[in-house]
Amino acid sequence: MGDAMKGVLLYNLSKEKLTKLRFLLFKLGLEGRVVSPEEFNLPVGVLAGAEGLSPAPEATEAPQESFSGEMLVICGLSSAQFSGFLNALRANRCTVALKAVLTETNARWSSVELHRELQREHEALQKARPADAAKKSAHK
């Protein structure tokens, strides 16, 4: 993704979590951009400043869709920066269930579409985990 921000798009975070995340990003030398609900229909890549993408006319004319769940979209980080960010989240007990990395595919999706897809994946993983845990348990 050419010229996308090096940082994280931040969605629907509590004031406390937003403050914590902004501090972590600052310490790591990364940007943080709060995405407002009015921007949820725009392509995620446009929000991240990716080159070659522009909002489709229907994105600004379509009825405004929204979501209330937290979400992070990680943009333009090297693998070392990505690992550092995830480690900082864990070390500071700053949990956000829905996280994505900006890709050429999802850069064209609206935030609503990306959130919907991440929510489906998260729910599928949650359903699979109890079954996996039971298989691995030594106490049967």
Image (cartoon, grey):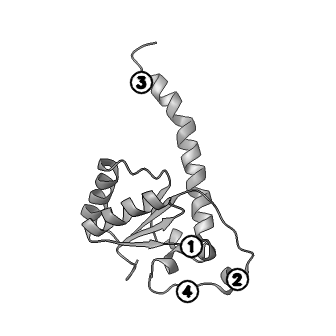
Three-letter code, disc 1: Ser
* x and y percentages locating residue 40 in the rendered image: 61, 72
Q: Is residue 92 above or below residue 47?
A: above
Mark 3 neighbour density, 10 Å: few (under 14) some (14–19) many (20 or more): few
Query: Which residue in the protein does label 2 denote?
Result: 58
Report the Cα–Cα distance between label 4 and label 1.
18 Å
Q: Which residue is mark 3?
A: 136
Q: Which residue corresponds to the image point at 58% horizontal and 56% vertical from the top-left? A: 69
Q: Quadrant of residue 37?
A: bottom right
First-in-chain label (3 vs 2):
2
Q: Residues within 10 Å of mark 2 (few under 14, many from 20)?
A: few
Tell me whether the residue at label 2 lies in contact with that at label 1, contact meaning CB atoms closer than 8 angstroms.
Answer: no
Question: Label 2 to label 1, Cα distance in Å?
Answer: 18 Å
Looking at marks 3 and 4 on the same chain, the residue that comes earlier in the sequence is marked by: 4
Residue 29 horizontal side relative to residue 103, left or right: left
x and y percent of residue 60 in the render? 67, 83
Q: Residue at label 4? A: 54
- What kind of element bears circle 4? loop
Q: Which badge, 3 or 1, is on the more N-terminal residue?
A: 1
Give SS at disc 2. helix
Q: On the rendered structure, is 75 left or right of 52?
A: left
* SS under mark 3: helix
Q: In the image, 66: left or right of 96? A: right
Instruction: Give the residue type at disc 4.
Output: Ser
Instruction: Indicate the amino acid at tag 2.
Output: Glu
C-alpha span from label 3 to label 2: 49 Å
- The residue depicted at 34 percent of the width and 53 percent of the height is 89
Query: Which residue is farthest top?
Result: 140
Question: How far apart are the alpha carbons under marks 3 and 4?
Answer: 48 Å
* Distance of label 3 from label 1 (alpha carbons): 42 Å
Looking at the rendered structure, the kind of residue marked 3 is: Lys
Q: Position of residue 34 (x, y in %)?
A: 48, 71
